[in-house]
Image (cartoon, rainbow, N blue to C red):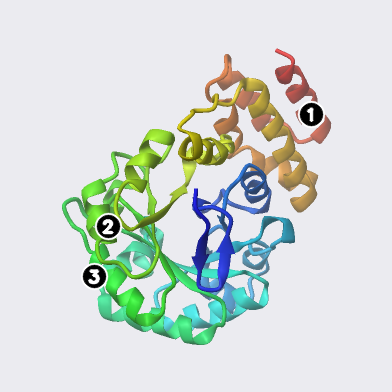
Amino acid sequence: MSKLLIGNIKVNNNIFLAPMAGLTDLPLRLLAKQDGAGLVYTEMVSAKALVYRDKKTKKLLTILDEERPVSAQIVGGDSYSMSEAAKIVQDLGADIVDINLGCPVRKIAKAGAGAKLLANEKLVSKILESVVKSVKIPVTIKIRIGLLPEQNVAPGIIKIAQDCGIKMVAVHARPASQGHSGTPDLNAFAQSCDGAKIPIIGNGGIINEEIALEFLKIPNCAGIMIGHGAVGNYSIFRRIEEFFKTGKKLSLPTQKEKIKWLKQHVIYSTEFYGEKKGLVLMRKVAHYYVKDMPNAAKIRGEINSMTILEDFNNLLNILIDT
């Protein structure tokens, strides 16, 4: 896979970990980076929460040198809070600031942010111009192809982005109404790439080498971004890179490999959040690791009841030996 330049930021490959609310915290980003992700993103953070100096929101933007380069994603519906939040993101050490124009969650839409902005090109332009002018680090955006099926506003948004100084656009090739399910619309994505003067990254439903290839065969597609398909499956970055280098498909992760990832995730989580909170937060991601294992429901139940790190480690030691 090729290296990519995003403004003045070089990334080692063009296979990225997508920003995911409630998932791409520091522990998960470290795991993805260690297995070959070229760029990792923070969770989506509220611009207004940053401006109001919310401590929990600020913690989401904790960045370590070993995970760089890191893009911090902000969401909001007005130019003032977005530009002020971008300054804070820059001051906290992010390498790139990313603007969310694709979140389909109703709460975000009601605030006039996320994918809702796709219906207001004038406001999009105002926000992008304001953010670009407010920071020295590169600014990128992540969008949907539209709000509804058969709609493709991405080419128009990309044109606006280019004119405003945006350095890269990631396009989730499904409408907001579809959420994270269904087949990506590769024709709409191809239309988005056509004539683009900045890197366009493909996103949506990428879970294996074949789907990654479908995106990367499209002219002007500069790379891919993997979301839920990477959680608990971090070797997908190396597997895709190897596939494009040699044409060979590496083996899928074994149960032992998944448990080792989970064990490391628990270590990172409890170190970062403290034992009690770290274990509670593991409950929402553990199912990604154990979903294909025998007695997965029973294992999840045990994990959901654990409050002591020693108990968690004892369970994982048993699983790794089975």
- The quarter of the image holding the C terminus is top right
Horizontal relation, residue 192 to residue 26: left or right:
left
In the displayed structure, 233 sits above or below 227; it is: above
Q: Can I make out residue 100 in this image?
A: no
Which residue carries the number 2 mark?
145
Along the line of sight, the residue nearer the viewer: 81 or 301: 81
Name, please, the residue furthest toward the left.
Answer: 150
Q: Are marks 2 and 3 in contact (CB under 8 Å)?
A: no
Counting residues from the start of the chain, the first of labels 1 and 2 encountered is 2
Q: Position of residue 81 (x, y in %)?
A: 49, 80
Counting residues from the start of the chain, the first of labels 2 and 3 encountered is 2
Q: CA distance from mark 1 to mark 2?
A: 43 Å
Q: CA distance from mark 2 to mark 3?
A: 10 Å
Along the line of sight, the residue nearer the viewer: 299 or 64: 64
Q: What amino acid type should be assigned to the residue bearing mark 1?
A: Asn
Q: Residue at x 53, y 57 (%)?
A: 3
As drawn, the label of residue 313 is 1
Horizontal relation, residue 129 to residue 282: left or right:
left
